[in-house]
Image: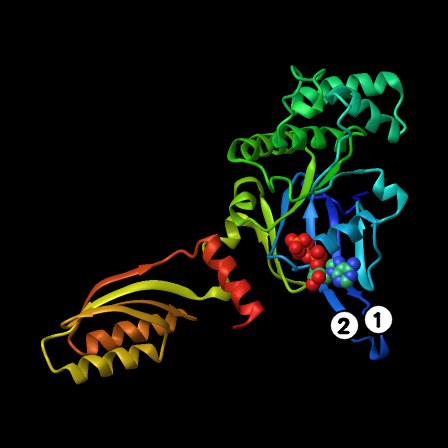
Amino acid sequence: MSSGLEATDPITVVHVDQLKKTYRGGGLFRRGNVHALSGVSLQADAGQVFGLLGPNGAGKTTLIKILLGVIRSTGGRASLFGLPAGSSTARQRVGYLPESLRVDRHHTARSALKYYGRLSRLDSATIARRSDELLKIVGLERRDRESVKRFSKGMLQRLGLAQALMHDPDLLILDEPTDGLDPVGRSEVRRVIERLRDQGKTIFLNSHILHEVELVCSHLAIMAKGQVLATGPIAELAGGGSDSGMTFDLVYRLPDGDDTIHRQTAEQISEFATGDWVAHHGNTWQGRLTCDQQSSIDRIVDIVRGRDGSLLRLQPVRETLEDKFMRLINAAEGP
Ligand SMILES: Nc1ncnc2c1ncn2[C@@H]1O[C@H](COP(=O)(O)OP(=O)(O)OP(=O)(O)O)[C@@H](O)[C@H]1O
């Protein structure tokens, strides 16, 4: 009998449904309540590197804290591996790297891992074996007996990743993993994340740096003001989705004539598109325009032809992830 679950079906690791969190303000009428999450829904499947991207105050840390069971939601649901987020069974399958993990300065990398392994109640043999494996994965195997006092921020962050992995969790939650690192440190941390992804770990990270997310994540949720503005595979989010319309560069030339006709033509075109006229030189006009449907582009072509004009260029412009991110954030945050 079929279980209904095909071998290729993705396994949902993080499932967040209409999640809400209001931090209560004090005083009469509860003035000062902060709606940190206002109905957030997203899903991360096994094997994904899922990025939560948004500006300061978007609600990213609040969401992570709920996933870890550090704070409770005020509405909606969050689960990990189908288990309620925050339950001890879910927590056992999660490794967490906080934004700035403080490793006691008297430690070496190896003694720090021993300490964290004991906190996870691992036996000595497992601690020794996992330490060997992890020091290699994070590229600290040759520096394992050195005092962490001499470690760069990037090395400390890689040690932090090793600590989060000691109990061999299936899901890693990373809070701003490359924040505050120099370019070398950032690329080393990214390489470790890629190695872990290749080993089949699911990674859920938050960041306010688009470039970092773009380099390492396969999937993304863009958040602002406690809401998810867009979510999906990065490759699909970049390049324009259905919400963004069709953007294209248009250059056309009209027959010599009076300027009023040229302006009327441009105005007529603008009725079918949003965007700006970038330049017009004599009877040649150039603009970057967005239409919400193909028929509007057809009308624009008809308008130019109807004036005996020539289309010199009609070229689609792919919206980059950065364009999309900025457009969504600006729309959410208002003027
Ligand atoms: N303990 C708290 N009490 C009251 N308000 C809070 C608390 N923690 C967070 N907030 C507010 O909730 C909103 C979301 O904060 P959160 O820290 O989750 O955002 P973030 O996206 O992680 O931002 P950042 O990148 O700055 O950490 C913000 O307006 C913040 O001021």
Q: Could you tell which of marks 2 and 1 lies nearer the N-terminus?
A: 1
The x, y position of residue 255, in whole percent, is 11, 75
Specify the quarter for ligand 1: bottom right
Task: Please give the residue where the numbered disc 1 appears in the rendered image.
Answer: 26
Q: What residue is shown at x 44% (from left), y 66% (from top)?
A: 245
- Left or right: where 196 falls relative to 323: right
Check disc 1 and give the amino acid type: Gly
Mark 1 sits near ligand 1, with its Cβ under 8 Å away = no
Which of the image's four quarters has the N terminus? top right
* Contact between labelled residues 1 and 2, with CB atoms less than 8 Å apart: yes
Q: Position of residue 193 (x, y in %)?
A: 62, 34
Please tell me whether mark 2 sits on a helix, a strand or a loop.
Answer: loop
Q: Quadrant of residue 123?
A: top right
Residue 240, image x and y in percent? 46, 58
Q: Measured along the vertical axis of the image, is residue 178 above or below residue 237? A: above
Q: Residue 285 sits in which quadrant?
A: bottom left
- Gap in Å between the C-alphas at discs 2 and 1? 7 Å
Residue drawn 79% across and 65% down?
Answer: 23
Up/down of 266 relative to 86, above or below: below
Question: Which label is found at residue 32?
Answer: 2
> In this view of the protein, which residue sits in the foreground, 163 or 312?
163
The residue that appears at 78% across and 25% down in the rendered structure is 112
The type of residue carrying mark 2 is Gly
Q: Of residues 270 and 154, which is closer to you in this image?
A: 154
Whether residue 41 is visible to the viewer of this picture, yes or no, is no
